[in-house]
Amino acid sequence: MPAPEIVIRLLTPADTPAFCALRLRAILDSPSSFSSSREDELARTPEEHVQRIADGPLHRAFGAFDGERLVGLAGLRRESMRQLSHKALLWGVFVDVAQRGKGVARRLVNACIAQAEADPAVMQVHLSVNAENNAALGLYESLGFIAYGTEPRSMRVGELFYDEHHLALLIR
């Protein structure tokens, strides 16, 4: 029997437990790729997680599903302050190791870009990426994101520091 195709869809509050579980796996797998630590994630309430993934037009997240199993994530958060509301932030992009190299991350990021394009208030999408993550940087650049700066020692994981590149996609 052929494997089911990966389906990309908006996450709903019912997806919160799967989101939390995959997010924790993502942080354990790639701690230098996420601002949150395991402890930060565990300290959030279920309501806070729901707000992050399905809180109306300002906070949305997409999931990649292999059958019923969540295997990938990407979130989009629009700035709420009036003078910044033309910007959205792409966050939390992660694909389970077994699904990498199959275009799942590209599909997730494209879903977020389409979500941003559907919101007439959003004119650009921003993201930060670990300067050592060449695969992610290549993906974002191939989708039209342009670098506008590098923050030295942006993140500290244990005793190690990591630089982050800041990128933007101008959509209007």
Image (cartoon, rainbow, N blue to C red):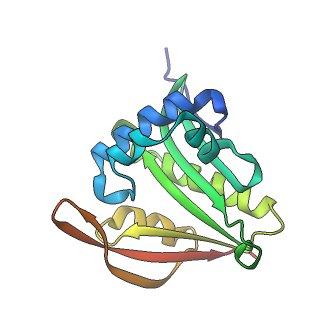
Left or right of 76 on screen, residue 119? right
Q: Is residue 123 above or below residue 55?
A: below
Q: In the drawing, does residue 150 fall left or right of residue 109?
A: left
Name the residue at 66% across, 49% down.
Answer: 60
Residue 70 visible? The answer is: yes
The answer to whether residue 96 is visible is: no
Which quadrant holds residue 7?
Answer: top right
Q: Residue at x 46, y 69 (%)?
A: 128
Question: Which residue does the image show at 47% across and 35% down from the upper left?
Answer: 20
Image quadrant containing the C terminus: bottom right
Q: Is residue 146 above or below residue 57?
A: below
Image side of residue 60 versus residue 66, left or right: right
The furthest residue to the right = 120
Residue 122, how many percent across, how many down? 75, 69
Which residue is outermost to the bottom?
A: 148
Up-down relation of residue 144 to residue 2 (above or below): below
Question: Can you give x and y, in whole percent of width and height, for residue 127 in the image?
Answer: 52, 68
Q: Foreground: 124 or 44?
A: 44
Residue 136 % position (x, y): 41, 62
Specify the quadrant of the image occupied by residue 137: bottom left
From the viewer's perspective, is residue 135 above or below residue 167?
Answer: above
Kindly identify the residue that appears in the image at 47 percent across and 64 percent down: 139
Residue 37 locus on image (x, y percent): 34, 50
